Image (cartoon, coloured by chain):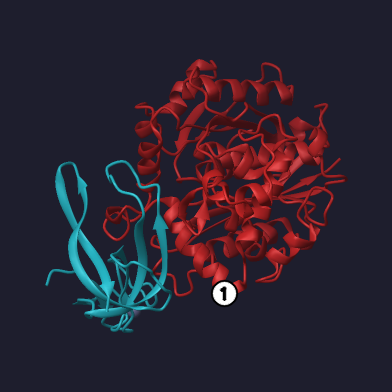
């Protein structure tokens, strides 16, 4: 396989974006990635679009074809890739494979979702359509509900407390304040969302034991990267950043069928595969972007991806190891919690953040001397997960 | 009483719900259809305050139950103070209206 370089990265701020259509958002993010790469008018061979549900959110399908038209990239190949909340990660994998295999030399990968076109309960229902139709969906299961079932078990098994969950939210919202692309740019405190007599009003229950500030917001947004070969990238001005490992793994559709529901097998397997392909170990990683759609997931993933032993993720958080400046900064972007989670965009936004971090372009949230990065994009409730290892080469 | 149909692998005995075309453990394709026993214990639960479009309700308790015969399934709990590990008795009731049609599923009460 050929090495794959992230030559360009770009995104638009995640927020509620009533003025833009989904395809507009993806086109603007794409242009930013293309301009950032500096390849001029060189042809793009293939486009992979990560999007979960444009048909349901926006009543538009075939959005990859629509995007190449808006960008005048014809006759580039174009596909929309759907893998739930890991659609962006799956689009990244497909773009990676196209360049690595020699099928394409220049590939645009775009993730995008416009979720705020429908009202909140409708968005909740659309996202819940990824659950099992007979065994889960009919009962009113939501993604926060599955996370609630998981969180109660995780707290009981590993002694994770609501303080620990809130520490994730506080850290990631602090990081989000340093990220101009973040949806939620507000400092919160343990007092305000957990301890104060009014805390239950500030952070009401969503799916007990998870409260509002344990959950990522519902966002509109898009992120894009331009992938190419080392040969083409060597003439470009930016530092060379490569994708060295890609892992993907699946688990049972329903959470209740897992023999130990606290074990996220697809996280464990996808991470192992990514590290193995990159010939790297978790201890080599300088910065990680994990899929904190719910606060508990940052803790669980930090353990099961291999960074901390089981049950130690919360202790690492207490010690400050995962803050910017700590031993392993996790989610310097603010993560899904603060950057936001336009579902199909997230897996690509994580790669954009790592590219900026590894190039040293992350501004106030820059992790010093970051050479190796890791990202994890968690689809379904852990039934389809992608992991990536990236390195700075020059 | 109406209830769900679960599947017991004829080769290795694994009990599965919902249906798979191949056994999760041994990949065999022959199953005995079984129904859950009357009672079970609560493995985990959540109280959902923000329900999806179409369910005009707050504070719905959802739980994962392991029946005495090994079937595991999710259902709606009609229980005031759910406790991990508590014994529950299964019922069958309308759990959601989808497209004007009542959809029935598992419900649970304290045993
Ligand atoms: Zn079997």
A30 up-or-down from A169: above or below: above
- For image coordinates 38% across by 32% down, the residue present is A119
- For image coordinates 66% across by 41% down, the residue present is A351
- For image coordinates 74% across by 30% down, the residue present is A232
Q: Is residue B14 visible?
A: yes
Residue A43 position within the rendered picture, expressed as x and y whole percent measured from the top left:
62, 21
Q: Quadrant of residue A276?
A: bottom right
A272 up-or-down from B72: above or below: above
Question: How many badges with numbers are in the image?
Answer: 1
Looking at the rendered structure, the secondary structure element under dot 1 is helix
Quarter of the image that includes the C terminus of chain A: top right
Q: In this view of the protein, which residue sits in the foreground, A244 or A382?
A: A382
Left or right of A147 in this view: B77: left
- For image coordinates 61% across by 72% down, the residue present is A158
Q: On the image, numbered disc 1 is attached to which residue? A: A157
Chain A: its colour in the image is red
Left or right of A227 in this view: B54: left
Q: In this view of the protein, which residue sits in the foreground, A381 or A78?
A: A381
Chain B: its colour in the image is cyan
A235 up-or-down from A374: above or below: above
Residue A252 position within the rendered picture, expressed as x and y whole percent measured from the top left:
42, 64
Q: Quadrant of residue A96?
A: top right
Q: Is residue A108 visible?
A: no
Left or right of A354 in this view: A251: left
| Chain of the residue under the numbered disc 1 shown in the image | A
């Amino acid at each position: 396989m050929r090495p794959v370089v992230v030559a360009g990265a770009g995104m638009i701020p995640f927020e509620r974006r009533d003025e833009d259509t989904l395809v507009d958002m993806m086109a603007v993010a794409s242009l930013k990635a293309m301009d950032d790469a500096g390849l001029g008018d060189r042809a793009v061979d293939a486009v992979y679009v990560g999007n979960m549900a444009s048909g349901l959110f926006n009543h538009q399908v075939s959005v990859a074809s629509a995007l190449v038209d808006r960008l005048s990239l014809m006759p580039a190949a174009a596909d929309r890739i759907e893998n739930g909340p890991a659609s962006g990660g799956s689009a990244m994998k497909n773009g990676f494979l196209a360049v690595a295999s020699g099928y394409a030399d220049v590939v645009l990968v775009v993730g995008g979702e416009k979720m705020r076109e429908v009202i909140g309960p409708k968005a909740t229902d659309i996202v819940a359509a990824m659950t099992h139709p007979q065994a889960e969906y009919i009962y009113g299961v939501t993604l926060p509900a599955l996370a609630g079932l998981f969180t109660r078990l995780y707290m009981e098994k590993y002694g994770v407390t609501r303080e620990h969950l809130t520490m994730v939210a506080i850290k990631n919202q602090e990081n989000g304040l340093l990220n101009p692309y973040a949806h939620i740019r507000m400092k919160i405190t343990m007092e305000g969302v957990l301890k104060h007599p009014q805390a239950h009003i500030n952070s009401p229950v969503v799916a007990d034991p998870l409260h509002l500030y344990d959950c990522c917001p519902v966002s509109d947004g898009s992120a894009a990267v331009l992938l190419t070969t080392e040969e083409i990238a060597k003439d470009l001005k930016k530092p060379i950043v490569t994708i060295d490992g890609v892992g993907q793994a699946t688990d049972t559709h329903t959470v209740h069928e897992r023999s130990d529901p606290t074990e996220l097998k697809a996280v464990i397997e996808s991470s192992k595969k990514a590290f193995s392909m990159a010939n790297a170990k978790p201890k080599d990683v300088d910065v990680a972007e994990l899929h904190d759609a719910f606060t508990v997931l940052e803790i669980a993933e930090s353990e099961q991806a291999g960074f901390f032993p089981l049950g130690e993720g919360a202790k690492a958080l207490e010690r400050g190891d995962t803050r910017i400046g700590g031993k392993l900064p996790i989610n310097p972007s603010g993560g899904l919690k603060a950057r936001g989670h336009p579902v199909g965009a997230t897996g690509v936004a994580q790669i954009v953040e790592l590219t900026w971090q590894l190039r040293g372009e992350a501004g106030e949230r820059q992790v010093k001397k970051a050479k190796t990065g890791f990202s994890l994009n968690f689809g379904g409730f852990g039934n389809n997960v992608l992991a990536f290892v990236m390195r700075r080469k020059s | 009483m109406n209830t769900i149909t679960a599947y017991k692998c004829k080769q290795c005995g694994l009990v599965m719900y919902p249906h798979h075309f191949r056994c999760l453990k041994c990949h065999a394709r022959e199953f005995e259809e079984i129904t859950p026993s009357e009672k079970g214990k609560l493995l985990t639960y959540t109280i959902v305050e923000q329900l999806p479009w179409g369910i005009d309700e707050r504070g719905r308790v959802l739980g994962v139950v392991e029946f005495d015969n090994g079937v595991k399934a999710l259902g709606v709990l009609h229980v005031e103070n759910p406790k991990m590990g508590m014994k529950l008795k299964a019922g069958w009731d309308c759990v959601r209206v989808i497209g004007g049609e009542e959809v029935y599923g598992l419900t649970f009460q304290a045993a």
